[in-house]
């Protein structure tokens, strides 16, 4: 348990880095209040994954940073609520997420795309480790968000 807490602190200290957690049908640590199912948390993460890609592709670095921070927040909740997620699945996410963060800060589209691809591979690796290989994530081809512009806004 100490290793899990240490890893969570390490990941949460890197802004706006996040980590991925594979979907599970296992029960959360706490049943108090309204605890979201891990699958629901991961679905929200998948939407953030899509939005992060299109924000970075359009060089909307402010939105990309926001989406990365939102992913981090929801996945921290998942790691806190679901203690049976292996530490190795968390560790595999560190490098790609740090690289995405650096690419966003540098406003580097090429590095962003490369790091995003590594993140996607890490997500799928985690799914396989958790016995959920039937869940395969890919780089989005089209945006399901027809009501959102991913282009950077013009500041007046």
Image: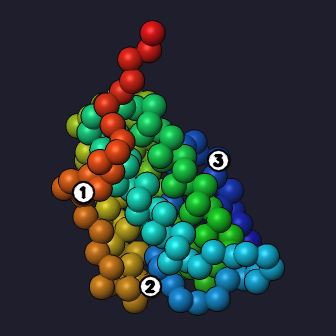
Q: Secondary structure at mark 1?
A: loop
Looking at the rendered structure, which numbered label has been put on residue 140?
1
Q: Position of residue 50 (x, y in %)?
A: 34, 54
Cα separation, mark 2 vs mark 3, equals: 26 Å
Q: Which residue is mark 2?
A: 130
Residue drawn where x is 35% and y is 74% of the image: 125
Q: Residue at x 26, y 39 (%)?
A: 57
Tally the numbered discs.
Answer: 3
Residue in view at x 76 percent, y 83 percent: 31
Q: Residues within 10 Å of mark 2 (few under 14, many from 20)?
A: some
Q: Tag 3's secondary structure?
A: helix
Q: Quadrant of the C terminus?
A: top left
Residue furthest left as drawn: 141
Q: Are marks 2 and 1 in contact (CB under 8 Å)?
A: no
User: Horizontal and vertical percent for residue 69?
Assistant: 54, 46
* Residue on which the image places disc 3: 13
> As drawn, is 68 to the left or to the right of 49?
right
> Residue 14 location, x and y as percent?
58, 45
In the depicted view, which residue is nearer to us: 5 or 16?
16
Expressed as whole percent of the image width and height from the top left, the position of residue 82 reads 64, 78
Pointer 2 or 3: first along the chain = 3
């Amino acid at each position: 348990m100490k290793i899990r807490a240490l890893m969570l602190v390490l990941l949460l200290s890197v802004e706006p880095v996040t980590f991925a957690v594979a979907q599970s049908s296992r029960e959360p640590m706490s049943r108090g209040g309204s605890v979201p199912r891990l699958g629901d948390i991961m679905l929200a993460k998948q939407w953030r994954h899509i939005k992060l890609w299109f924000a970075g592709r359009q060089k909307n670095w402010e939105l990309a940073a926001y989406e990365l921070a939102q992913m981090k927040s929801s996945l921290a909740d998942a790691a806190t609520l679901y203690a049976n997620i292996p530490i190795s699945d968390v560790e595999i996410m560190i490098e790609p997420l740090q690289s995405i963060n650096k690419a966003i800060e540098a406003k580097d589209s090429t590095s962003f795309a490369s790091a995003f691809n590594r993140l996607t591979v890490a997500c799928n690796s985690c799914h396989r480790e958790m016995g959920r290989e039937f869940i395969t994530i890919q780089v989005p081809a089209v945006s399901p968000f027809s009501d959102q512009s991913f282009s950077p806004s013009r500041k007046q």
